[in-house]
Image: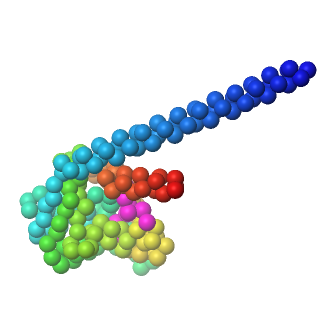
Amino acid sequence: MATVLWMSQQAREGETMGLARRLRDLLLCIFFFLFIGLIVVRMAETTEGKVEGEARVVDGDTLVVSDMRVRLIGMDAPELAQTCLRAAGPWRCGSVARDRLLEMVGAGDVQCRLRGEDRYGRSLGRCTVGPLDLGATMVREGQAVAFGDYEPEEEAARRQKRGLWSGTFDRPRIWRQTHGGMSEAPHISADWMTRLWSRIGHEGD
């Protein structure tokens, strides 16, 4: 009887150890692929360039800087023809978003760090005017939504009921789908990978 109990205990311990090894291997694989992804993104970032100068505003998330069409990365603004709703009634949220971006770029030259292109050949970039991050400001003020980045800014705008969040609206991606616009997936930028890796590192401390 003692032998049977001992064998049963050994079997349970073996199963526990096997599960632990599989979990360890899985975590190692996840960390490995995250590490490789970070390296690839960093290499891609070093091959991308910068563009700066006076900017022309196309809509709430697209600029033309030095003859280069730049889509602001990580955010999505309402389309120019899009309307939203609030207590006072419909309002042209797409035009308002464009006008706010126009106001910001009018303050000085725009600098964009480019991060590749989207499926339509537009350069993706994080653009600033001085210390002002255009994408972050647009999302923080509720003139645009997070689109692969700027989730904290969107949450702050939502809590404060700013801009789009003062009423109801279709997210621009949904509006485009229902109105025959361009199909676009959320952006994943190098900064997103860096922040993810940083969070993982802090959790391990």
Mainly helix, strand or loop, the magenta region? Answer: loop
- Up-down relation of residue 34 to residue 57 (above or below): above
171 falls in the magenta region = no
Residue closest to the far left: 67
Residue 99 seen anywhere in this rendered image of the structure: no
- 48 and 106: which one is in front? 48
Image coords of residue 53 (percent x, y): 10, 68
- 8 and 164: which one is in front? 8
In the displayed structure image, the side of residue 23 where residue 147 appears, left or right: left
Image coords of residue 119 (percent x, y): 23, 45
In the displayed structure image, the side of residue 75 where residue 86 appears, left or right: right
User: Which residue occupies 45% across, 42% down?
Assistant: 31
User: Which residue occupies 46% across, 54% down?
Assistant: 201
User: Which residue occupies 23% across, 69% down?
Assistant: 128
Split into 4 quadrants, where in the image is the N terminus? top right
**Magenta span:** 143-152
144 falls in the magenta region = yes
Where is residue 145, by image quadrant? bottom left
User: Which residue occupies 37% across, 59% down?
Assistant: 149
Where is residue 49, by image quadrant? bottom left
